[in-house]
């Protein structure tokens, strides 16, 4: 598992971009204090989902308003047509840890990134 941040670094109802893994991820903390981790880049165009609006366990992309489910990564509002990866998050002693998905990321056209392996090395 990878350490991402302190839980207190994530404001409830908002997201936090973490670029210590590649591609970067976004940590979301709901008003109910649930924590979710998704790939931070919208699958439609290069925009940070951490800068989006969080409501009803969904994040809305700040660029073109596509919405992604924080639990599944599925998109339910165009123009994005593909979801984003979800990573298994765990909070231990006030710190957010993540097990990164091994699935290929759904990055937008023209955006490339190495995928961080389980050993923390970019492939």
Image (tube, rainbow, N blue to C red):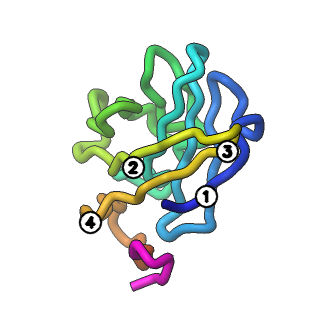
Q: Name the spot of residue 100 as percent of width and height, x first.
A: 40, 59
The label nearer to you, 1 versus 4, is 1
Badge 2 is on which residue?
Answer: 87
Q: State the residue lying farthest toward the front.
A: 93
Number of residue marks = 4
The relative height of residue 68 versus residue 85 in the rendered view (above or below) is above
Q: Which label number is shown at residue 3?
A: 1
Q: Is residue 30 left or right of residue 58?
A: right
Residue 76 horizontal/vertical position (percent): 27, 28
Whole-number angstrom distance, CA of label 4 to CA of label 3: 26 Å
- Residue at mark 3: 95
Instruction: Tell me if residue 121 is in the magenta stretch.
Output: yes
For residue 52, say whether it is visible.
yes
SS state under label 1: strand
Mark 1 vs mark 4, CA separation in Å: 21 Å
Residue 112 visible? The answer is no
Which residue is tagged 4? 104
> Residues under labels 1 and 2: Cα distance?
13 Å
Instruction: Give me the residue at 23% from left, 43% from top.
Output: 81
Is label 4 or label 3 in front? 3
The span shown in magenta is 117-123
Q: Could you tell me how far apart the alpha carbons at marks 4 and 2 are, in whole angstroms?
A: 12 Å
Q: Is residue 105 above or below residue 47?
A: below
Alpha carbons under labels 2 and 3: distance apart: 16 Å
On the image, which quarter does residue 70 sit in? top left
> What residue do we see at 58% from left, 39% from top?
91
Q: Which tag, 1 or 3, sits closer to the chain's start?
A: 1
For the point 62% across and 37% down, the residue is: 15
Which numbered disc flags the more N-terminal residue, 1 or 2?
Answer: 1
Which of the 4 quarters of the picture holds residue 111?
A: bottom left
Per the image, label 3 sits on a secondary structure element best described as strand
Q: Is residue 8 magenta?
A: no
């Amino acid at each position: 598992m990878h350490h991402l941040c302190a839980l207190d670094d994530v404001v409830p109802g908002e997201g936090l971009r973490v670029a210590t893994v590649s591609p970067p991820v976004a940590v979301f903390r709901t008003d109910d204090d649930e924590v979710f981790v998704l790939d931070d880049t919208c699958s439609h165009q290069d925009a940070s989902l951490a800068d989006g609006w969080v409501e009803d366990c969904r994040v809305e992309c700040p660029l073109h308003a596509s919405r992604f489910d924080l639990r599944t990564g599925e998109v339910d509002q165009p123009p994005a047509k593909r979801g984003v990866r979800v990573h298994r998050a765990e909070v231990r002693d006030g710190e957010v840890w993540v097990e990164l998905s091994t699935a290929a990321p759904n990055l937008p056209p023209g955006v490339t990134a190495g995928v961080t392996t389980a050993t923390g090395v970019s492939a």
